[in-house]
Image (cartoon, grey):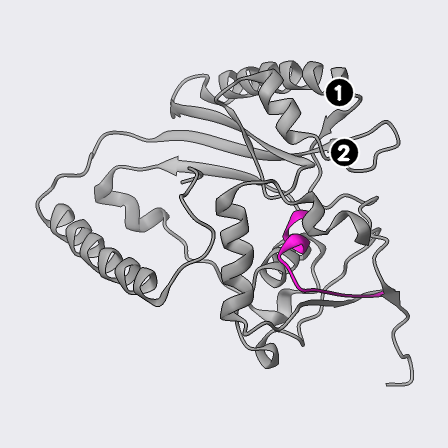
Amino acid sequence: MGEEIAKTSFTPEDHAEFERRLAHETKLLGESLKAGRFSNEGFSLGFEVETWILDHNYFPLPVNAELLKAFDNEDAIPELSKFNVELTCPPRVLEGTVFSDARAAFETLLGDANEVARGLGGQLVMIGTLPTIREGDLTLDNLTPSKRFYALNTEVLRQRGGRPLRIDIEGEERLVSEHYDVMMEAGTTSFQVHLKTPVSVAHRYFKPPSWPPRRCWRRRSTRLFFSAKACGTKPASRCSNNRSIFTGVPLKKERPDRRA
């Protein structure tokens, strides 16, 4: 996960080979579960935080390559855009002072990374959706130059048959934006918790994602809405009618028609 790949486009033969390997590995997973090969030890916790690199005016600063090279820390890795990096907290056994220990370790990591960012004329900020993001920031010019990100962009558009990705969110104002690339995904970041459980109780902790449109008006759902739209491959008829509140982002805005 996150490792570089060898090429940026794939043939039908590549897709067939991928499906074959996926089916084989799924079968091995089932066999390993039945044979008791997975750990049944206690719980452990880790997390990752996607951060923004901003200049002194709080606009995106596309220098993640320079920052990561100067920082040289395996717990900091690139994200989709040049103005995002991901900071990770290694797994810890879920007992005792695990939360305060994890917080202290992360604050040290963030502080050290911020020192490097300041040397590049920037700073790291943790915020889901940046209020100062501009349409011009979300272009392929700011795509992190990695083959896996180029491949992601190519494959999403291929599966959509070349159709653009569209955001249409209605609140006090209406936000409408279309992209022929996946860079709208860079408009939102997240804090993700990773929980390792004993295999015997894993089914009690696994919760598949849900997407009930009636809940999309909640502000906390906006990041998920934005992220899902930014890399969605479903037909447009199933991806264009969700609504949510989305504030503070100076993309293309339209006032809703109050007469409707």
Query: Which residue is found at the position 52% from the left and 39% from the top?
Result: 192
Residue drawn where x is 71% and y is 46% of the image:
141
Determine crowd level at label 2: few under 14, some 14-19, many 20+ residues with C-alpha closer than 10 A: many
Q: Earlier in the sequence, mark 2 or mark 1?
A: 2
Across and down, in percent, residue 57 comes to 88, 32
The reply to whether the C-beta atoms of the residues labelled 2 and 1 are less than 8 Å apart is yes
In reply to whether residue 247 is colored magenta, the answer given is no
Task: Please state which of residues 160 and 27 is positioned toward the viewer in this rendering.
Answer: 160
Q: Secondary structure at mark 2?
A: loop
Q: Read off the magenta span.
A: 173-186
Residue at the disc numbered 1? 120
Q: In the image, what residue occupies the spot 56% across and 68% down?
A: 212
- Look at mark 2 in the image and give the residue it sits on: 61
Residue 197 sits above or below residue 151 on the image: above
Residue type at the position of mark 1:
Leu
The quadrant of the image that shows the C terminus is bottom right
Left of 66 or right of it: where is 12?
left
